Image (cartoon, rainbow, N blue to C red):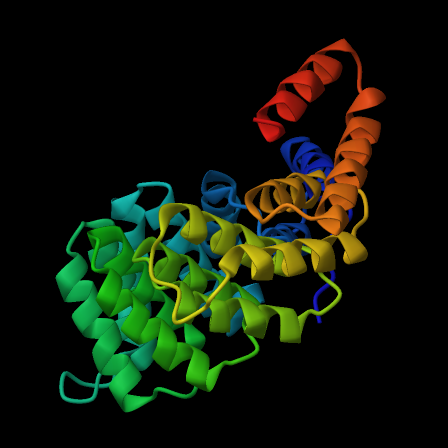
Amino acid sequence: TITPTADPVGELCDRLKSLEAGSGSKDDKQSLLKFLKDNQLRRPEIAVKYGLELINSHASALGDDVWDVMETVLLNALDAGDRETARELYERLNSKFQTSADAPSLRMKKLEGHILEAKGQFDSAAAIYAKVIHKNDNSNPHHYRRVVCIHKAMGNTEEAIKYLNKYLKIFPADVDGWLELAEFYVSIERIDYAKFCFEECILLHPEDYRYPLLYADALYTSARQKVKRGGMKNPIDVARTYYIQSLELNPSNTRALLGLAMCLRAMKKSTQNQKLIEWAEKEIARVYSGEGEEARKMLKYVLNALRQ
């Protein structure tokens, strides 16, 4: 398991200062590329600059690692809009890994798909990824996610949902995948299906307050908009339950407090609900009261809105 650096941006600045001072070795540059990847820092220009220095000056010393460096630089070049560098690296990689026209390398097909995406040829890229999935669908989540991204960018929500469902059958522990699928279902007002996705997130990470909060938000919004709810009789009541669950996991969660208060206001009046409303408003006031004059003004606005 890769543990991200506590202050990745600060460490990146320190690494770059060392490299720009001329004291960076081959290992330093190679370590920089790995650091960017491990910490999910999107700095394509930096990766291209030092990656090309590695390829041009240390290719023999890198050994077989040079091909991985080329692939990394190619993808970052596409991200930076440097298609010429990407094309040159693709040709070098293709001469190494392409076996034949009848039996193309899956590695090269993936890179070809990225290049077509960068050119805006989304249909062609999606077709390539679909072929790769058909041949080798259980080995790499990357191709499924690329197809989903393409269909999302093109507005093909139903196709994106189809591929994301296939992906999650193979990789069911991907909580980000479940969240994305839930967002798709919410966007087409299928809260009944989104419910299942949020529940999977909660099962995967029961300690994380965000997932019951997101589910509660979706339920409350659907109830106010009167959209499909999969037979759920009282979504406001269910939303209230999940706002409370989120608060149990993170008592200082202001968004859940506001959601709970709105749910209670929307429900039938009762002595118990009134006591909960008063408690929620006191907690909201406590959170805002120590945050300065602007926060206190916002508190007054929020409480007035809740009481309307």
Specify the quadrant of the image occupied by residue 168. bottom left
Left or right of 224, for residue 216: right
Q: Which residue is located at x 75 percent, y 33 percent? A: 281
Q: Is 31 on the left-hand or right-hand side of 124?
A: right
| Res. 19 visible in picture | yes
Quadrant in which the C terminus appears: top right
Q: Residue furthest front?
A: 270
Image location of residue 254, percent across then percent down = 71, 38
Classify the position of the N terminus by image quarter: bottom right
Task: Reply above or below: 153 against 143.
Answer: above
Looking at the image, which is closer to me, 47 or 38? 38
- Identified at 28% across, 74% down, the residue is 162
Query: For the image shown, how many numbered marks are present on the structure?
Result: 0
Identified at 75% across, 52% down, the residue is 247
Pinpoint residue 182: horizontal percent, then vertical percent: 44, 63
At horizontal 38% and vertical 70% (from top left) the residue drawn is 230
Q: From the viewer's side, name the closer residue of 49 and 53.
A: 49
